[in-house]
Amino acid sequence: MLFNSFIFFIFLGIVLPIFYSLPSKTGKNVFLLLASYFFYGYWDWRFCSLLLISTDVDLFIGKTLHKQEDEKVRKRLLTLSLVSNLGILAVFKYFNFFIDSFQTLATSFPQLVAGPIERAAALLPELSIKLSPSKEQIQQGIVLIISGLFRKVLLGDTAGRYVDNIFENMEAYHSVELICGLVLFSIQIYADFSGYSRVARGTSKLLGVELMKNFEHPYLSRNISEFWRRWHISLSSWLKDYL
């Protein structure tokens, strides 16, 4: 389900009233989990099994790691988590598993990387509170969703149409027009990523959850390293810490 699709706002219009009406924090968390699986599986419910396997394996390993003090055992558990998660990615995306029955899905494997990609240390405390958005959060959420859609649909998608036309027929254009295509492409990718991130942050605010800011005017950076810090902040910080 895409953030800029009509069905997403129907989905959101159903989820929010139910979420607000639930009295307990536990009930809200369970409902959010189920709604998240529906959101993920709307494209193809069969891929929910992959998410469920990854979730269960990492939940078990995480709980075991918390109790385990033996360093060798901890490293084995970490290796098991990496192998299981990367194995799913390798088999179902890069080896075109199910290619006979999913001709299209083999080249658009479901992705959850548009961001923000929150760490457990930041997200779990947000889910442990009452999950009742304030009036200010609701206002901010609506503004973020509208501005995100403006970036994605009006800027990103519009620029993308020109970019596709230019680079599919490069021999028909002059150098100045090709340079304009490069500029439009830079606008397209920024508007796509930042627009999606804004809609994600806005939606989370409507649920009373605060997600980190994912873009900080990257095209105003003075050098490459500063650009890297400002572009897709949650992903770049994750790569820096773990890779």
Image (cartoon, rainbow, N blue to C red):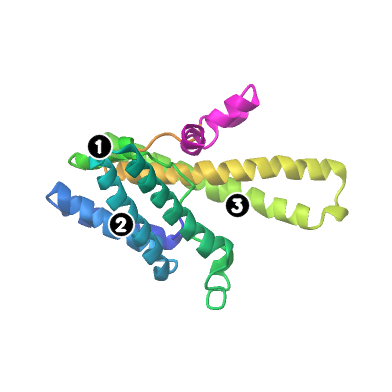
- Relative placement, left or right, of 41 versus 153 is left
Residue that carries the numbered disc 2 in the rendered image = 56
In this orientation, does residue 3 appear? no
Depth-wise, is mark 2 or mark 1 nearer the camera? Answer: 2
Write down the region rendered in magenta.
216-243
Vertical position of residue 234 compared to residue 57: above or below? above
**Which is more toward the observer, 180 or 37?**
37
Viewer-nearest of labels 1 and 3?
1
Of callouts 1 and 3, the N-terminal one: 1
Residue at the (47%, 41%) spot, across then down: 147
Q: Which amino acid does label 2 sit on?
A: Asp
Distance between the alpha carbons at the discs numbered 2 and 1: 20 Å
Q: Mark 1 points at which residue?
A: 125
Is 238 inside the magenta-drawn segment? yes
3D distance between C-alphas at marks 1 and 3: 36 Å
Residue at numbered disc 3: 157
Q: At numbered mark 3, what does the secondary structure look like: helix, strand or loop?
A: helix
Does the stretch in magenta take in 164? no
- Of helix, strand and loop, which mostly describes the magenta segment? helix
**Number of residues whose C-alpha sits closer than 10 Å to that of mark 3, classed few (under 14), some (14–19) or many (20 or more):** some
Q: How crowded is mark 2: few (under 14 residues within 10 Å), some or many (20 or more)?
A: few
Q: State the image coordinates of residue 67 (x, y, percent, origin top left).
A: 22, 41
How many C-alpha atoms fall within 10 Å of the one at disc 1: few (<14), some, or many (≥20)? few
Asked if the residues shown at circle 1 and circle 3 are in contact, with their CB atoms under 8 angstroms apart, the answer is no
- In the image, residue 230 above or below residue 204: above
Task: Tell which of 122 and 213 is nearer to you.
Answer: 122
- Label 2 sits on a secondary structure element that is helix
Q: Which amino acid does label 3 sit on?
A: Asp
Quadrant in the rendering for residue 172? bottom right
Q: Measuring 27% from the left and 54% from the top, which residue is drawn there? A: 32
Residue 41 at x, y percent in the picture: 39, 65
